[in-house]
Image (cartoon, grey):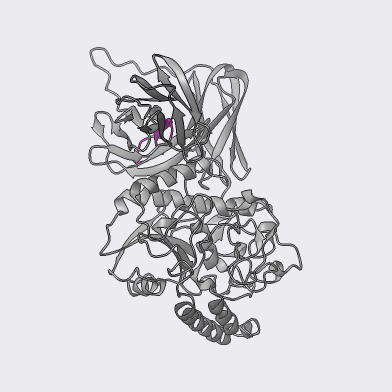
Amino acid sequence: MTATRRAASAAVTAAAGVLALAAGVTGLTSSFGSTASADSSLAALKARTEAAVSVNAHGLNAEGYEGDEAPEGIDVDDEVPTETLVQRAAAVAANDSVSSGRAGIGCSDDGRSGNRVQVMYVVAADRPDRFSQVSGLLRSYSSEVDSVMLASAMENGGRRQVRWVHDTSCELVLEHVVVGAKDDDSFPALTSALKAMGHNRPDRKYLLYTDAAVLCGVANVYADNTPLSSNANNGRFPQYARVDAPCWAASDHSVEAHELTHTLGAVLSFAPHKSAAGHCTDESDVMCYPDGDGVRMTQSCPTTHEKLLDCNGDDYFNVNPKPGSALAQNWNAANSSFLYDPPAPALVSGTYDGTTVSVKPQVLSGQGWSISWAGSGCQVSSARTVSTSPKAASVGAACRQGGTVRATLRQEDGRTAQLVVTAGATSAAPATPAPGTAPAPATTATLSANAREASIVAGKQAVVQGTLASGQAGVPGLRVDLQRRTGSAWGRVATAYTSSLGTVSFSQLPRATTTYRLVFAGGSGLDALSSSAVTVRVAPKVTVQAKGLRVSGTVSPAKRGTVVSLVKASKRVATSRTDAKGRFLLKAPKAGTGYTVVVPGSTVVLRNALSAR
């Protein structure tokens, strides 16, 4: 975290709490000689850790609330509207600095067995329950954590993603948990309530999206430096990472990744760049910030590294640590059994129907991917396909007999898969019905999409809706993703399930003209489908006030340098540019009526006459 911004971090990082934890593990390494002594030491560590967390780490900070301070620009007391959360999801998809077109989380085995991270939406009984409105958003926020882990591991020649709890379709399992009215008042109260409800499995780390406005982010970490699979942070006890709604999907910093990384065992006392209280000092790094008096920060990595783990890979996370280094000899969070090396991609089948080559990718990592096409004896219509649709890709091709098209799929981590499709001698002709009989009508699945309003003013909600149908009937209960186009790439921004009539509806708050589409990944006997593109045109919102000959106002969304003109009788009589907050000031040359304020895409007519007074 940058030194100039307030940081969200685990509440366990209060200096007194960390010192108490460090005292609790004295001699722990030598005690692993026997199972009994190991269990005894770990039990004592657990007791002392929880006591330290509950007693030492939950006082009020300088801002007056529990835990550490939130990122700059975030007030933990703010009740965040659902519309803002939608905007954040769209911003993650459009401005993701650590990923390229991620389609979702990665699949790992059966999604249930072994050590895993369980994601929960948690809300107190006295607060509005927004589970149905935000569940798709939380899945998007969680996939960003996978992006952070993968990009961080790739810096040192490896790969890591989170072993999430997911279903057989690789969809993140998001549990809906309602706790008592006072259970969200503090971290100890919440974890106690969850344990009482049975959410206390040692093979689970619980990422708690808490729909509250109490704090920013807190987590528990055990101060166990031992580089063994039996490390206290590696599945010996349940661990919890809480992120309150004001800090979900913070723009320049992943609070979710920060808190979850604490539960993986970071940052511990052996780290060469350890801070005063469980963080690090070498910026830029998602876990680094000045967390105590006398902590001196250094700028060792560029600011573009802010969302990634372990600047220079020497404190807490490196898939290939330098032999003999402190990280090689102590606990390395990259070795956590709650992470895994995601699978390579595959191309499982390919066909040519006389005009189109189609292949079926299998990208279980959830990473973004692209396919390059090369023809031999075939002329292909496009050299490259970029997509986040996990099950289908095609390219137009004109092939002579025996011609081939080679498809090369590359996923985000650089691994590839290839498939060669050969054009047959002839295309299969459709069967001819027997005389006197009519051919049976084909059942064709379709996915339509439209915008409720094709044009809106900035700040107004856009609704993209559609229908998944098979034949004439809507198909209920299937997942459909809303994707947004950025350049030539598509990225998922929301997920919904079709209604009993096969319909879906998504609410978005686009800041500029945006193109969307709906994507169905396939299932229930239906092939993968994409809808046609739908463009929602967004005009800037212009507010104007006039006093004398001076005309002032704001343009939203705010952007420095937007040209604002004052026009009369089709002639521009004054010009200004907006500042960083979208504000402008114009001066009319003379009094009178008929003035109009014009910005690109929007016009406001001044109804009252301007006066020289």
Instruction: Please state if 288 lies on the left or on the right of 353 as rendered.
Output: right
Query: Please, is residue 333 above or below residue 408 in the view?
Result: below
Residue 510 x %, y %: 40, 36
Residue 67 x %, y %: 47, 69
Quadrant of the image for the C terminus? top left
Instruction: Please state if 414 lies on the left or on the right of 527 as rendered.
Output: right
Q: Is residue 23 magenta?
A: no
Q: Residue at x 30, y 71 (%)?
A: 182
Q: How many marks?
A: 0
Front residue of 422/23: it is 23
Question: Based on the displayed image, in which of its 4 quarters is residue 232 positioned?
Answer: bottom right
Residue 237 x %, y %: 48, 74
Q: Residue at x 60, y 63 (%)?
A: 289
Q: Residue at x 74, y 62 (%)?
A: 322
Instruction: Please state if 431 lies on the left or on the right of 369 as rendered.
Output: left
Q: Examine the rendering and report whether any part of residue 380 can be seen.
A: yes
Front residue of 76/488: it is 76
Residue 519 x %, y %: 40, 36
Question: Based on the displayed image, in which of its 4 quarters is residue 215 positioned?
Answer: bottom left
Q: Of all residues shown, which one is farthest toward the front?
A: 613
Which residues lie in the magenta part? Answer: 512-526
Q: Is residue 522 magenta?
A: yes
